[in-house]
Amino acid sequence: MPRTEGGRRGRGTGGGATARRAARVQSASGTKLSYIRRKVPEYELLDEAGLAIIEANADTILEEIGIEFRDDAEALEMWKAAGAEVSGERVRFPKGLCRELLKTAPHTFVQHARNPENSVEIGGKATIFAPVYGPPFVRDLDGVRRYATIEDFRNIVKLAYLAPSLHHSGGTVCEPVDIPVNKRHLDMLLAHMTLSDKPFMGSVTAPERARDTVEMCRILFGEKFVDENCVVINLINANSPMTFDGTMLGALKVYARANQACIVTPFILAGAMSPVTVAGTLAQVLAEALAGAAFTQLCRPGAPVVFGTFASSISMQSGAPTFGTPEPALVSYGAAQLARRLGLPFRTGGSLCASKAPDAQAAYESANTLNSTMLAGTNFVLHAAGWLEGGLAVCFEKFMMDCDQLGMMQAFSRGVDLSENGQAMSAIREVGPGSHFLGCQHTQDNFQTAFYRSAIADNNSFEQWSAEGALRAENRAGQLCRRWLDSYEAPALDPAIAEALTAFVAKRKAAEADAFA
Amino acid sequence: MPRTEGGRRGRGTGGGATARRAARVQSASGTKLSYIRRKVPEYELLDEAGLAIIEANADTILEEIGIEFRDDAEALEMWKAAGAEVSGERVRFPKGLCRELLKTAPHTFVQHARNPENSVEIGGKATIFAPVYGPPFVRDLDGVRRYATIEDFRNIVKLAYLAPSLHHSGGTVCEPVDIPVNKRHLDMLLAHMTLSDKPFMGSVTAPERARDTVEMCRILFGEKFVDENCVVINLINANSPMTFDGTMLGALKVYARANQACIVTPFILAGAMSPVTVAGTLAQVLAEALAGAAFTQLCRPGAPVVFGTFASSISMQSGAPTFGTPEPALVSYGAAQLARRLGLPFRTGGSLCASKAPDAQAAYESANTLNSTMLAGTNFVLHAAGWLEGGLAVCFEKFMMDCDQLGMMQAFSRGVDLSENGQAMSAIREVGPGSHFLGCQHTQDNFQTAFYRSAIADNNSFEQWSAEGALRAENRAGQLCRRWLDSYEAPALDPAIAEALTAFVAKRKAAEADAFA
């Protein structure tokens, strides 16, 4: 079990030079926590009456319209046996069925990391940050935008390992398109397992890849441990509106039956996959999440499951997705409330943007998304660092800038210290009117921890900033990124385990012909 | 009186070409409102127990430590007469005195604009945005950073007039350093009064300049109207910690006695002007605001007054102010709660940043500040557009980007539409599983107003964005800015009033020798 107050660590896991290097990296970019325990309240956007309307509409969708479970005869049989009305691939749910099934789902659970200090709690007042998921392109440190490779993938995993404000190694941090599509999950998993000791995500692109994931987890954690504990978390997107497809259902069944966590996420570009209104989108999101999450409990009662929401709007001129705008923020706040009422952990948001460059647009949109993500009380924050171009590219510079912002969110989440030291009346008495607090005892006692220190923001004068080359934020972020990568050393791993993982990957690769589509 | 739902306007105030041009500008950048009426709740950071601790500490500061009222013998006499204990320039307040005095201060009030459609409500659920205040430098449309001039000043006033998401013309939108310091307030006021018809701020740098402000308001609005209504709002900064200086007190007295509004603002760089902790800063802010705001009621019971807070942290390495960090956000949330409990309108935040360029740092910091400003329930948002370099420079490109963000905040503040149309069940029924909402009737009926449309964000593909020159957000903002300035036409003003204002400025200028310090 992780410590309840996501422990602060002054040292890396290695000794000597590694530890000193890790300490330097960490002190320059926020406090190392295994996860955040929020001491600030959630923002309650909707009142009881509003939430009740949306819940009633979700019930109506489930009962009258139903949800399609496609290309999965077994799923349809399971629903029939559970008391749902199945016609073709359409499943209609008697009122209350999904909520009843979800009573076995845990309110919070622990995802274990191979380094127990990095295990995370998911749910309740805990929040964890994971990197971007899914981009086929990379904007590299030379500012070149190109297809991503396994080397890029490994570098992102290394950076996430080093980042004190990232609690999770993530999953498909980019698509390594230089590896055949039917083999790349093996290289991705191997990277997460060997280059990092933070928790990670599994493959969902085919049931057999989910099975490979579970097999590799058994090598890493031991078979019995995996059956009894959550060691991998997996992204199961609904094919909105109101549809789950066979691929996602196949992966979901493998993971839930193996007692591993699923994040069931209606993937919504409002206006295309849902109505153009917030209240309409929320009712649909709730219905989809209820059906998908309840299905995990049909597979294995008690399997950990997260209520996910990916919300974006579209440009009504071009149909392109937009990010950081007001409507998705409203959806996130509302969906978080619905998940809390359901007693499920919640996932949404991140550092989302539509910009093609790590410029002001990228930052405004990311900050708008991240602020609503945090105040919503989100438990699992995917896409927290590196996202660019509506998720089509991972940007190294933005990855570093986002990590800096995540450090700020960690600090914000500590809330207001109301202890005697926090009240600081001794300082106010000592200083008095018209003087300053810079040298007073209280300031000296507290200044090391008082304010968040950014490793990227430049707060100097215009003159000094100019003399230092008038760098933009992304330039400084790129420099920091190179220093981090130079400082990287892999966390220790039992050589026998490393060998077994490598052998498994080699064996599975040999069994498959290359496929690139 | 303004309409309670800050009316949407499809037309400019002129006819024909002007109206068409204004409509083009507006449709490209959000909805024109005279002010925002928030339909979303405030974020309540602190609970009752936490707020009570801070209020008790503020009472202790007022009673035991006291506040200095410097270089103003009259103020000290007034406090003595009101029952305070005065020793030297230190004023100590019997418990409850300030709160008792503030019972005559209005909870909300109207600041009138010469165009009644632009009058604003200040307090309660109303929020208004005003531009940056005070920068001596400008970052112009060629990216050159130089001293600001009266031409820059006039251009910012024109842009604020054109911006649908700015509700206020502001005050010292930049320092026109090409005009002698003892005369520039006259040119600034003339610009606000003639180039815009939105509400504006007065001069506070000397009591006689405050008197000039009131005189010019009497010319613009009529003497009787000014005595009976608030037509100008004025920024009175405390000289924190726990000090008001003679200049600010002199201006405060002029305005309060003329029934005009004061924003009494503890100006805090935490760690220098207040303790390094949030709770300590909040207690000091509350004590200073209580003393300063209560003093307005000694000058004229019923005079409108706003509880202000300017909160920033400092870099503990260099002493430089930092912005967009977690600690000032916590201070803003807490101070807003304290102001609400006091029943006073509240001012904080804006689009603050320390960056020297309109880059990602500027945007992250501004968005962090603006998000907390909005969710705090701030009534008067100064520095909402254009702020760069810790307030040392106004940046035209950032002004435009900030206005776009303010438009998003307006849209967010509308909250969730829970009407039948908002619930959109007809759309969900019509579309059903596995289809899309793009063509359905509900989408067609609502798509014009469904989502906020940014005039600056680029949501296109990487290929299209590249083909269009791979512009950064600030480049697009600069282009939009030039188009706005080209489209500007002054709102109509009675020629007799314009002449009288010009004559007053000429007379007052002739009476003063040039002074540049």
Image (spheres, coloured by chain):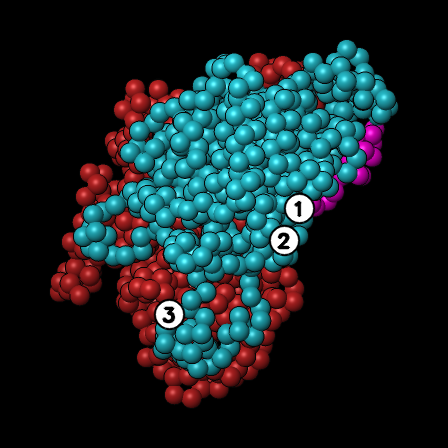
Chain colours: A cyan, B red
* Left or right: residue B33 compared with residue B484: right
Q: Which region is colored magenta?
A: A95-109
**Residue A117 part of the magenta-drawn span:** no
Q: How many marks can you see?
A: 3
For marks 2 and 1, the one nearer the N-term is: 2
Q: Position of residue B146 (x, y in %)?
A: 18, 49
Q: Where, quadrant-wise, is the C terminus of chain B in this rendering?
A: bottom left
Which is more toward the observer, A27 or A356? Answer: A27
Distance from disc 2 to disc 3, alpha carbons, whole Å, reads 38 Å
Distance from disc 3 to disc 1, alpha carbons, whole Å, reads 42 Å
Name the residue type under label 3.
Ala
Where does label 2 land, which residue? A2
Residue at horizontal 64 percent and vertical 32 percent from the top: A214
Q: Nearer the viewer, mark 2 or mark 3?
A: 2
Which is more toward the observer, A162 or A500? Answer: A500
SS at circle 3? loop
Mark carried by residue B272: 3
Q: Are marks 2 and 1 in contact (CB under 8 Å)?
A: yes
Residue at horizontal 48 percent and vertical 19 percent from the top: A180
Mark carried by residue B404: none
Q: Chain of mark 2?
A: A
For disc 1, the neighbor class at 10 Å (few under 14, some 14 to 19, many from 20) is some
**Residue A102 part of the magenta-drawn span:** yes
SS at circle 1? strand
Q: Position of residue B178 (x, y in %)?
A: 15, 54
Where does label 1 land, which residue? A110
Q: Work out whether disc 2 and disc 3 sit on a shared chain.
A: no
